[in-house]
Amino acid sequence: MPRPQFLHRSLLSRSTRILTSPPSSIRTMISLAAPLTARSPDCFSGRSSSWSNANVGRSSSKRPSTSLSARPSSSVLGQQGGKRGYANVLSDTQTSQLQGNGRYVRIVEVSPRDGLQNLPPPAVPTEVKRELVERLLAAGVRNVEVGSFVRGDWVPQMADTSRLLPLLPPTSSVPPPPSRPTRSTSPFSGVPTTSSPAPLPEDASDVHYPVLVPNMRGLDNLLKLEQEWKGKEGRERLTDEIAVFVSATEGFSQANNHAPIAKVLGSLPDVISKAQSHGYRTRGYVSCVMTCPYSGPTAPGQVVDVVEKLLEMGCYEVSLGDTTGEGNPEAWRLLWTELLNRGVDMSKVACHDTFSMALSSIISLLPLGVPTIDSSLAGLGGCPYSPGATGNVPTEDVVYALHKLGYETGIDLDKLVEAGNWLSETLGVRNESRVGRAIWARKKAAEEKAAKAAATSASS
């Protein structure tokens, strides 16, 4: 039997929570999208259009061509015209729309699962994973995707999930983050522009350890483990959240699940219903929402079809994955518009960074009120079955950008950077976070300078 890949690369997602941003924010995001890309690719195809670098900052009546039949409605999106240049993007009005003014943004950390699952042998020791989760918790991260209940011979790096969960701090015993999280003392770190940020929401301190459960067998294995540990060491339960996944394209569904989309979706209602009966909330993942490595560009309507079905089944949140990493702000604008036109309330964004567009896509969507972002410490991750896709957007870069723009995360950036560098050194991999490398280098330089000064003082 072919081995399923159980891979997911997150970019955009939504939940049943209400979209709080006003329509004017949508118009603001549109004005941001084109200049951020510098070169506007054909939406979803990756091909360069005639809207080249030379056109940025010039008045133009033509928009980039697209193969999509669904075009944004001017009644929803507002009007766009006039000169579009970088100076305009940074105008006071637009900058104020981009500022968070203390608004809380939830971070879902995916490095222990999505980040580690594709690493080559040997398997990452369970103790390293435990320390990784504990370091993330110490940094203020409260939503940590910790593993998968899949066959160990198919995904060797996840074979120890049943051993890892009981080793993690009980969710009820993790102390809440401070109402005003400590900001990084590094000169690179961002400080909210607002002097009086809003208090963190009550559920910001709630700890969740979501685990991927691909089918009923995986759920049953989780329930069996829960039964074995119930009441031990004061634990009521090991986790309260599972995740299920499905592709938006038939090509990737056949390659990843070895089944058509309809069959995969047909197997999930029983899994979700049984999970809910045992007190688990369910998060849905949709892959290939931008392009598919087997069938090319993905029509937004296909994505919305799958999202609606997952929500109808009872998923509290659906994370949309840019598996190939070819998304950009303009492409996400089109998908966002299709979701809104179909009555879907967007509430979360999570980015997969391949063509370095993930962070710009996040920033361009922030004015729309996106409350949740998926990311991976040190940019860890990558899909070997999607050529050219290399890693997730680094959590350090996301948190830095959010803090710089005045958003609250409840996360201590210094501790996060320390955790990222520890993880990279422990695994012997490159730290893909530019923010992490910069802050760490400045910190080391300062320590060396202080040590030399101390040595000079002692010898004199």
Image (cartoon, grey):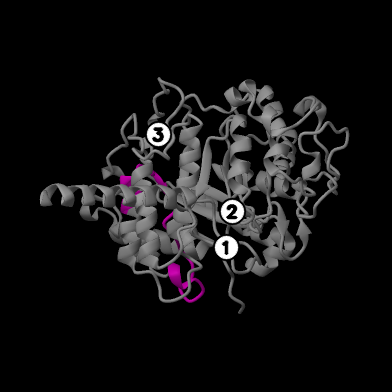
| Residue 217 coordinates in the image, percent (x, y) | 49, 65
Q: Residue placed at 25% from the left, 53% from the top?
A: 231
* Nearer mark to the viewer, of 2 and 3: 2
Camera-nearest residue between 165 and 185:
185
Q: What residue occupies the far bottom of the structure in this picture?
A: 1
Amino acid tagged 2? Asp
Q: Which residues are magenta?
A: 134-158
Q: Along the horizontal axis of the image, is 20 left or right of 203?
A: right
Mark 2 to mark 1: distance in Å? 15 Å
Q: Are marks 2 and 1 in contact (CB under 8 Å)?
A: no
Q: Earlier in the sequence, mark 2 or mark 1?
A: 1
Q: Is residue 373 magenta?
A: no
Identify residue for label 1: 7
Label 2 sits on a secondary structure element that is loop
Identify residue for label 2: 353
Q: Earlier in the sequence, mark 3 or mark 1?
A: 1
Identify residue for label 3: 203
